[in-house]
Image (cartoon, grey):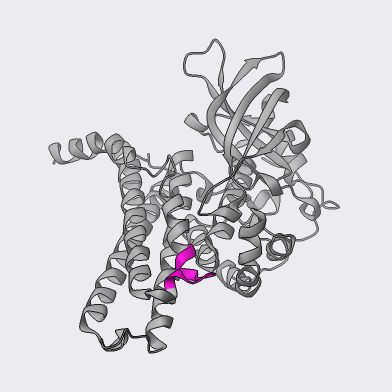
Amino acid sequence: MSTLSESANPPVPVLADPVERAKSLRSIIEAEADRTNEIGQLSESVVGAIRETELFWMNVPAELGGEDLPMKKRFEVYEEIASYDGSTGWAFMVLAGFVGYSAVGLGESAVQALYGDRNNRALAAGFAAPTGKAVRTEDGYRLSGSYRFGSGTLHADYIAAGAAIEGEESGTLTAFLRRDETKQLGGWDVFGLKGSGSIDYTVEDGLVTADYTFDPANYVPLRGGVGGRMDFVSTAVTYHTAVALGIAKRALQEIVKIADSGRARPPAPKIIDQQRFLHDFASREAYLAAVRALMIENVEGMRAKLEDDEEITDFDRARLRQTAHTAHSVARETVQWAYGWGGTASIRDGSKLGRCLLDIQVAIQHALIDHTNLDDVAPTILDHYRSE
């Protein structure tokens, strides 16, 4: 367990509800959204504003001075911020996510260095999958690799780099290196989520002690409550789903604004008066609400098991991944539907619906979400029906 000095960490202040703190960011995130997408990363103003809310560290265990939020509350915060701007939501999700992974899973010396002083806490981001190579040393690992899609790394103090351990058939790790131990290359040339700064980077002969690593395939939480005790992949797909649903939520908000403005294509009636629009809006909104509710049900079911010290089953994990993929598909269909009804308002420069459309198309291509995930979980779900 962590031991923190009282001088480094005065009493933890009482913070407002995290979703309310997220809502307080809406004006600055929306005001900076165009700039965020122009420069390909969060603006300094947005990063500073999020720092002030302390939401970057919402997943840090209480014993390290964090909030250790329940998974459902984390989901709500990610969803809310993504509804203001998809790129900001994505980058924030990755940064707060990796802060949580590291604060729960790294060794004692590492978490003290990163989070021991609440007045000078680190940010972390990177790529956890084992695309690099690691060689064991006397007290840690020597690591090299090339990495893509390093969302949030432009703002991180520590960069995560996944690797396969040489000479060990199934050995993997995710190492956390200081920013100056990596080389950032750029390369985020995309049409959606442009402001997430998901750049390429390399690590060349980096040295880390074992305390600065964990195994994402066999993630062992070393501290904190049940909020951080889901397996690594289940946690990641939950976070990603929250962002996708936030983007879809914004698309519905935008089409309601357009409909309420009296938009019409002469000689057709106003879209707010068209039965087809009303029927489809009610249907699309219901699909979105239903898949969101199922995702929350899965998350809460896993939380209840963890609280009761019950085992999370392969079926629990398969159902979560199945729901996450379905939620992304429903989110994309919702955004596409809203974009279509927006007509020429959707295609104007600076259109929020246009940005939602581009952002969701990129979000759904993530390796944790793409169609192969259904292929992966289908056998487990089939077995569930065979056993009943």
Indicate the position of residue 345 as horizontal and vertical percent values.
43, 76
Indicate the position of residue 166 as horizontal and vertical percent values.
57, 13
Answer with the quarter of the image where residue 201 lies.
Answer: top right
130 left or right of 99 in image: left
Q: In the picture shown, does residue 249 fall above or below 271?
A: above
219 left or right of 386 in image: right
The N terminus appears in which quarter of the rendering?
top right
Taking depth in this image into account, of 38 and 305 the one nearest to the observer is 38
Q: Residue at x 21, y 83 (%)?
A: 275
The C terminus appears in which quarter of the rendering?
top left
Taking depth in this image into account, of 365 and 53 the one nearest to the observer is 365
Q: In the picture shown, does residue 259 fall above or below 309?
A: below
The verdict on residue 190 being magenta is no
Start-end of magenta stretch: 346-355
The verdict on residue 353 being magenta is yes
Q: Residue at x 47, y 57 (%)?
A: 359
Q: In the picture shown, does residue 141 fall above or below 125?
A: above
Answer with the quarter of the image where residue 280 lies.
Answer: bottom left
